[in-house]
Amino acid sequence: MSRSFTWSVFGAMTLFFACFFLMPIWSTLEVAFVSTKGGFTLEYVWEVFRNPVYREGLWNSLIMGSFTTLGCLIVAVPLALVFTRYEFPGKPLLNSLILVPMILPPFVGAIGVRAMLGQAGSINSFLMQIGLMDPEHPVDWLGQGQMVGIIIMNVLHLYPILYLNVTAALSNLDPALEDAAANLGCPPWRRFWKVTLPLIMPGVFAGGTIVFIWGFTELGVPLVFDYQMVTSVQIFNAIKDLSGNPFPYALVVVLLTLTTLMYATSKLMFERGNASGGGRATMGREMIRPKPLGAWLCTMSFVLCIGAAVIPHIGVLMLSVSTDWYQTVFPEGLTLAHYSGALSHELTLTAISNSLKYASFATLLDLVLGIGVAYVNVRTKIWGRQLLDAMAMLPLAVPGLVLAFGYLAMAREGQPFHWLMIGEDPVLLLIVAYAVRRLPYVVRSASAGFQQVSPTLEEAAQNLGCPPLKALWKVTLPLILPNLIAGGLLAFSFAMLEVSDSMILAQQATHYPITKAIYSLVGALGTGPFLAAALGVWAMLFLGVTLLGAGLILGKKLGALFRV
């Protein structure tokens, strides 16, 4: 491939990341660290730590992220060990169903959980009917005013990310290392702590980083549960007062700094977990075939975890077919009218159209950028290619809330990128924001495809006089098309259900995407919550089909898409 073509692709990709990844972050820093007199100041940032409200929000966010990660580890690591070590009934099917929690944004699931576990929910109604609860003092199972419900919702939604990464790490682990420890008399539990866990730590870290940052900056679930004392909600509420107020920007800077420090510290601590000898397996692992009781216990462990994870989905489904469901064990009546209503309501109809538009253009942009980044990283040896690849993956590690706020900052009047805000329409901002946030899926998918296709095919085409770009278009891209389809499907579907960017950037009803419309309907009177649930079910069906298709195409490589 000609050097001029390679450097052109590299330059174009670098320019995009400079403008739409680094620039939003810089625009936020600029407001947070520049005083009204034009000089550098730390006053606004210090005020975040001095203000007891902001301080409590940060502390609660840390607790939320930490316990979300801990909960996901408790669920995902044992499941991954069972899957990679034992044969048991229903293993392939259960491994596929483990992705079910990801087909619903957690804040949509929170709508169903609130209907079931809220103070006026079905569980309390049942306990009141059988005389085990005082109707005057209903129990708040969700821990309103606490974070219990939020953490549970996050764990039920995010544990598949850790499961995918840990399973991939265990599959790549050389079983000869564990066998050697066993031959020296090391018991199973000690063998796990001393041999297995240190070697799979990079996989645990890769998934745990995403889970922690997601839990630390979760916005939708606290909003649905009406829990205000977390940093993400404080930032969301501060959007109403951005003009001349530097403190929201300072709060975003503190959030970004904390996530960056935690990511860097964890990487320094656990990167060494990639000990020599832990790479690709030199021999196949012989699966253990337990006795029937043990095999069914393995199956039941998956069934129980998946069953618990789909409780929010069941709640959303029941609410979507209810005529009324308040202080009753089951819905008082059933109807399918909400499904047609969700597709014909003025707000939802516009939102679906908006989301299709935003996600479609974002996916096209992702495909162009993803192919460019993957090509430079896999097919070339130029300086800086690893940096470009790392930059493309960093959106997984940088909170979406931070980037969304940065886009608002860079599109302010008088800023160089003010043209991104077309009047009051944030269409360009949303397209770019969706594209940057979902680019890692396409990059990893395209990189896997380039690694599977020999570069000699392109070289042969060029030797016959085919220009480099045409050789890439006519020879390589058709061969990696399944990878591009899988990455594109994931990028499109997750963009359709993006929460942080949608909540922050879309401020007028005419520009709402689906997730912002669902949030608006939850707080509406009348049939609003039922329509929100029905729209959530449509979203579940859409994302479920997408994940199934991507999983069939990528197989075990699906976990690599959720790795920083």
Image (tube, helix red, strand yellow):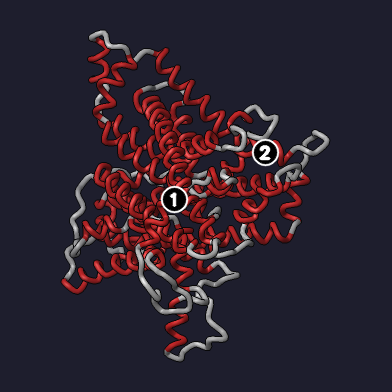
Residue on which disc 2 sits:
29
User: Is disc 1 placed on a helix, strand or loop?
Assistant: helix
Residue displayed at 24% across by 14% down: 461
Tell me the amino acid under the disc marked 1.
Phe
* Left/right of residue 129 with respect to residue 261 in the rendered view: left
Quarter the N terminus occupies? top left
Marks 2 and 1 in Cβ contact (< 8 Å): no
Dot 2: within a 10 Å radius of its alpha carbon, few (fewer than 14), some, or many (20 or more) residues? some
Residue 474 is at least partly visible in this image? yes
Residue 160 is at least partly visible in this image? no
Query: Residue 83 versus residue 522: which sits nearer the camera?
Result: 522
Residue 488 x/y as whole percent: 35, 38
Residue displayed at 39% across by 49% down: 203
Tell me the amino acid under the disc marked 2.
Leu
Where, by quadrant of the figure, is residue 466 drawn? top left
Residue displayed at 55% across by 55% down: 219
Residue on which disc 1 sits:
205
* Left/right of residue 34 with respect to residue 422 in the rendered view: right
Residue 479 x/y as whole percent: 24, 28
* Left/right of residue 390 with respect to residue 537 in the rendered view: right
User: Disc 2 versus disc 1: distance between alpha carbons?
Assistant: 28 Å
Closer to the chain start, of discs 2 and 1, is: 2
